[in-house]
Structures are given as structure tokens and as C-alpha cells.
Amino acid sequence: MAGRIDTTFAKLKEQNKSCFIAYVCAGDPDITTCGSIVEALIEAGADIVELGIPFSDPLADGVVNQMAAQRALEAGTHTTDVLELIRTIRKRSEIPIVLFTYLNPVYTYGFKEFHADAARAGADGVLLLDLPPDEALQNQELLDTTGLESIHLIAPTTPPGRVREIASEGEGFIYYVSREGVTGAREDLPAGIREHVEAIQAVSQVPVAVGFGITTPEQAATVAGIADGVVVGSAIVKMVEQNAGASDLPQKIRDFVKPLVDAVKSV
Amino acid sequence: METKPDTLPDAHGHFGTYGGMFVPETLMAALTELADEYGRAKKDDRFQSELEGLLREYCGRPTPLYFAERWTEKLAGPKIYLKREDLLHTGAHKINNALGQILLAKRLGKSRIIAETGAGQHGVATATVAARFGMECVIYMGAVDMERQHLNVVRMQLLGADVRAVTAGQATLKEAVNEAMRDWVTNVRNTHYILGSALGSHPYPMMVRDFHRVIGREARAQILEREERLPDALVACVGGGSNAIGLFHPFLGDEGVRMIGVEAGGHGIKEGEHAARFQGGKLGVLQGTKTYLLADEDGQIQLTHSVSAGLDYAAVGPEHAWLRDQGRVEYTYATDDEALAAFKELCEVEGIIPALETAHGLAHMRKLAPEMGADQIVIVNLSGRGDKDVEQAAKYLLGEEEA
């Protein structure tokens, strides 16, 4: 049975449109407000929501996402609260939900149990930033991913042979990290994205989304012309940071995301 | 004959269930390249002889194995020998690894060096070899550590390094590692990360261990020459565990040699008050490796405390976790107070000012002594000198006496 992620990409492919994937950190600025923010992302037209489970030591993240994780943890966000948030979203929406985090929170929860419980709550996929697929295969306790699709990363530094290996095992979609560096907004898009994405698409069973550093509608439109999906994360998180505490925060997020979605859909 | 052949880690960096390569995809190619190049360098006689030559002439190896006569008398237990890594260039064992890694960086064609540092000893060692080889050098250091190890900050700056303060989280060693990793992810094509302990992703735990094995190799030959027998026990402090693994590893096959690693007990084994991973820790994954670490029920890394910046870290090197499971090495801890008392005693009895990290091993020696006989022998790794710690120590020790 095709899951929500596959169905969404298939539908967009029929329409010849790219997928807009919006990232926010669960529990930022607190778990209740975050629920309203996710609702605003859906209203703005996001196709997939990526929810970060905050981790104390996010070494692949830039300062914006680090601070978001810190706010979420200081607000008392536990892994179980994130699962509860997913259940709440599921009451109103069938939007695909991908969890985005580091291995230790998942490992501590129990790898298999986490996958099962998150799936039961309504999550569709999980991306673990510090778990390369080959490492996962070498740890008995990391083998059972039943319930969630494992989203894998490919980087500009990933050699072609390895691209083929990762892409051929891909589930849901491949997340192509558009540049060497941590998450966070950049002024320009790196050269060579198109070549990289095409090379991955040539060997991948699943769609290819591009993220890390996409900030403006112009950048989003450019990437939408190249890839099957566009991920915007830190730029949205920064809006949350700048407007945390504002009563119209969800409205502000919707107003910020809508032009990004429109840009992606204009291509 | 040295030890039984060491077969660990496996090709992917696993020590049993521990270790591995838990890193963002961007770093996988660089780590694989590093592991491959290290594999070639290890078998390359020219690399080894260049390293040996520099260790001898630039760093001052071999370091003495010193019989601590007055301390032995005072503790009235076994004969105590100190492996004098404090006499090495830059004042600690750390340069063994920094030198090995910068030679590798040169082979890899990298022009820029980054490192994290806690106590500053690894930062100083890295800044030193970067100056020696004319490479650009950036050192990440927690803002709290910069304050408590100010002397080392100045040393690094004199050596031409750019010391960058890390203010996130607890602003100590763990945050410095995060920041170094972020730099590396961003600049991986021209930069080599000289990780300073037997920690992190493969190949670091193996490589750092191998570069420090010279400590144990020398100590083993020296004690055999001096006493015509092997020691009964080895004692070393364990933060990430590089000095300990360097001393222990060449003795692993010597069944009669007991080995004891000493973690930082801080104010005692209470949450957030210590850095003794084998006391309050659990299995998890942090900064590239699967090992014992201090985390809460959600897997969030907990605060740690130790009077010594070099031991103030939430995870232990993966090979130590494996050796503990095997029952080959025992792990215990010493509190801040115990370490400070041992620090003071060594100053007064032997005229040696040890590093506060090292003092944790010395503190355990004081507890061990009454259990052992005069015909027995213990080697304690004097992993570093304490010049950097005199202000800290004065605050605790002199302050206490005045009060």
C-alpha cells in the first residue's frame, strides 16, 4: 500500500509540480503554539511537514535550528509530546509528516518502539541526521524500521558509487543537502545543484528533494525547476524565533510561507 | 612479545557494539578517506620514521618512567612509577596524537587544521604542530573552559591559532566538539579535524589510540628493564580516554596486569554533578560514536561537572566501553576533592605539579595503595603537567585554607 509520502509525490508528479516541504522544530516555542504553526503551514499550502524532534547537541544544524531546539527543550518538550502533537495534527489533516532528528533521542526511546509508536501516532517517515544507512545495517538494534519510511541524505561530497547505493535503498524521498555546511539560510544557491540532482534522479527509485539554505521565493522557484521537492527550514524557524510570543504568530508564518509555496508551484 | 594481536576495531570502527560512524552524510567521504589514508600511513615506513623522528627530537620522547620514591614511602603500599608524559613538549601526552594527525593531514593535502579543546592541552598541542608545519589553525573552546584555562588560551594565541569561544549550552568541551564538527562539515574539502581524544567517529578512536600507544610501549620496556618484570597494575584518568588507552593497550595481553581507569566524580555521583559515564551513564550515540554517555530519559545529553576541564565530558571513548564489558579494565572515579588532595600531595612530596585531569588517577592511587604490598608495582600515567591549573588549584586549595 502506498503511504502518504508516495501518494503526495505521485499526485504532484501528475500535475507536473514540485513538492513544498516545510520544516519546523516541534515544541518551538512551545508544543501548543507549534500545533498552530503546523496548521498555518498546511493552510499556506505545504505538501509535507517535517517536524524536528529537539536534541541537545544538534551538530549538523546552524545557529537558527540550534536555538529552536534549545527553546523547545527549555519549554519542556519531551519525545512523547512530539508524538502527541502528531496525533493532534492527524485529527485534522492527512498531510505527510516526516520526523527529523538525531539518533540519540530515538535510540533512548527504543529504536524499534519509536518507529512503531510514531507510526501509530500518524508519522510517515523519519530522517536521522547522524545515522548513515550503512551504519544502520551494522547494528542489530537499528534494523527494524517497521512503520516509518527511512529518509536518507545525500551530500555534495557523497561519491557516485555511494550515491547509487543510498539512492537505490531510498524510501519516501532522497533529501539532497545542497551544500557542504550546516542547516541555515544562505544568500545564494550553490553551483552545480542541477547536475547533482539529475545524477541522483538517474539512479533513485524515489523523488529527490533539495534543502539546506533555501530562503527566498526566488531560490525556492529555482530549486523547484530542478528537483522533485523543495525543503525550507531555517527561514521558517527564524520567523518563529522573531515572532515568538506574538499572538498572531501562526498568521505571520502563513504569510511568510504562502509566497514560498506559490513560488514553488509557479514552476 | 607485546600483546595478543589487536583485531579491533573492525573495518567500520566497531569495538563490539560500540564505536562506528554516526555522522552527517557530508562527512562520510572525508572520514572514509581519512581511514584509508591512515591505513596506508600505518604501513608506510617513511611515515613512521618521520613520526618517530619528530617524537624524539621535537617532542622529547622517550619520556622517563620515574620511580616516585617519597610518594611510595608516604603511601606505604606498592612501588609507584610515574610515566612522565608531563615532560613531553607542550606538557601533556596530547602532542603524540596531534603530531601523528598533522602528518596525515599533510599526506591528505589539507591546508587548514581545526580542533576542539577542553583543558586546552590538546588545543596547545594542535596549535604547536600547526605552527611547526605552517598550517592555518582554528581551535574551538568552550567559553567556560577559556576562563578556567586562561593560560592555555594565551599559549594557543602565541602559537598563531585563532581561538574561538563557544557559548552554546554548557560552554565546555562537548559544545566545542559540536562547533568543530560544524566547521568541518562546512570546510571539509580543505580542512582536517584533529580530534583530541579516543572519541568520535571511526577512524578517530583507533587512530588516536594508535598514536598514543607509544606511552604503553615505552612504559612496558622501561619497567622490564628496571624491575625485570611487568607491573601489577596500571592507573590512568579517563575523560575521552586517550592517555589511558595509550598506556593500557600494549599491556592488554599481559593477563597479570590489572588496569584501572579513573573518571571524574565531580561533586559526587548525582545528576549533573559529575562526568563518570560508567557510574550514571547509559548506552547511546553522541558526536559520531556509540558508547556510554550521560543522558536523560529522552536522550538529551546531561550537564556534567568536573574541576578538570579535560574530563568534563558526557561520553567515554568506545573502546573503554568494550574493555569494561570484557572485564579487562576496571573503571572507577575520583571526586574533585580527592583529585585536589592528590594534586597537592604530589606537589609537596615529589615536587611535581600534575594536571588536574592527571590528579584523578593519582587520587585513585592513594586509595589503591593500602590494598597492595611493598613487593608490588603500579604505573600511574602522569599524563600532563599542572602549570595551566595553578590558578584553579589556588582558588580551591589556598582559598580553603584561608577560610
Image (spheres, coloured by chain):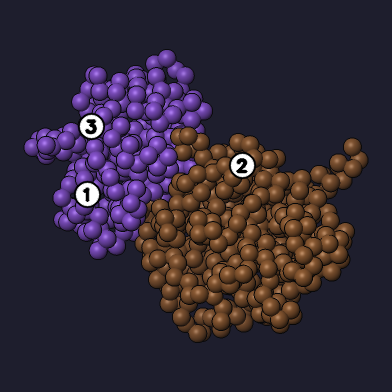
Chain appearing in purple on the rendered image: A
Q: Indicate the amino acid at tag 2.
A: Thr
Mark 2, other Cα within 10 Å: few <14 / some 14–19 / many ≥20: many
**Where is residue B103 drawn, in percent x and y?**
53, 73
- Mark closer to the observer (1, 2): 2
Q: Secondary structure at mark 2?
A: loop
Above or below, comparing residue B72 to residue A256 in the picture: below
Q: Are marks 1 and 3 in contact (CB under 8 Å)?
A: no
Residue B165 seen: no
**Where is residue B157 drawn, in percent x and y?**
68, 58
Q: Quadrant of residue A134?
A: bottom left
In what quadrant of the picture does the N terminus of chain A appear? top left
Q: Chain of mark 2?
A: B
**Where is residue B319 drawn, in percent x and y?**
51, 60
> Which residue bears the numbered disc 1?
A170
Q: Chain of mark 3?
A: A
**Where is residue B375 drawn, in percent x and y?**
77, 70
Q: Indicate the amino acid at tag 3.
A: Pro
Q: Indicate the amino acid at tag 1.
A: Gly
In what quadrant of the picture does the C terminus of chain A appear? top left
Discs 3 and 2 lie in a common subunit: no
Q: Colour of chain B?
A: brown
Above or below, comparing residue A235 to residue B316 in the picture: above
Discs 1 and 2 lie in a common subunit: no
Q: Earlier in the sequence, mark 1 or mark 3?
A: 3
The answer to whether residue B69 is left or right of residue B371 is right
> Which residue bears the numbered disc 3?
A96
A131 or B181: nearer the eye? A131
**Outermost residue, right side:** B402
> Which residue bears the numbered disc 2?
B304
